[in-house]
Image: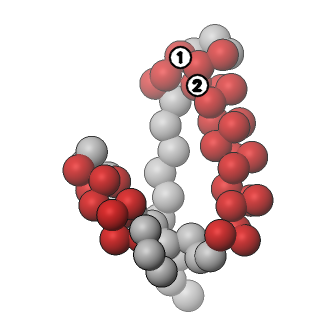
Amino acid sequence: MPGRAPAGDLIRDIGVAPLETGGLHNARFIEPFAMATVELAYRQPGGSGLTYRFEKLRG
C-alpha cells in the first residue's frame, strides 16, 4: 500500500517501532482509542505521563 513506508519512516524517526494494524477499515477501532488517550493524558488530572505499550502476543 502506498503511504505505509513513508509513515513507518516517520514513526521510526521519533524513536518508536511502527505496528501494522491492517487496512484502513481498522481506523474505526483505532481512532476512538486515540481520542480516549488524548482525553486521559491531556484533559484529565495526571498529565502527559500517561503512556501505553503494545506488544504482539504469540500463541
Q: Is residue 38 above or below residue 21?
A: above
Q: Give the residue at x 72% y 71%.
A: 25
Query: In the displayed image of the protein, which residue is found farthest to the bottom?
Result: 59
Residue 13: horizontal and vertical position, in percent?
Answer: 23, 50
Which residue in the structure is indicated by mark 1? 47
Q: Amino acid at mark 1?
A: Gly
Q: Is residue 32 left or right of residue 6?
A: right
Question: SS at mark 1?
Answer: helix
Which residue in the structure is indicated by mark 2? 41
Of the 4 image quadrants, the one containing the C terminus is bottom right
Residue 32: horizontal and vertical position, in percent?
Answer: 74, 46
Q: Are marks 2 and 1 in contact (CB under 8 Å)?
A: yes
In front of the other: 29 or 56? 29
Q: Give the residue at x 53% y 16%.
A: 47
Q: Is residue 43 above or below residue 24?
A: above
The number of callouts visible is 2
Pointer 2 or 1: first along the chain? 2
Q: Residues within 10 Å of mark 2 (few under 14, many from 20)?
A: some
Question: SS at mark 2?
Answer: helix
Q: Amino acid at mark 2?
A: Ala
Q: Is residue 57 left or right of residue 9?
A: right
Q: How is the image coloured?
A: secondary structure
Q: Is residue 22 left or right of residue 7?
A: right
In front of the other: 43 or 9? 9
Q: CA distance from mark 2 to mark 1?
A: 5 Å
Q: Give the residue at x 31% y 53%.
A: 10
In front of the other: 23 or 21? 23
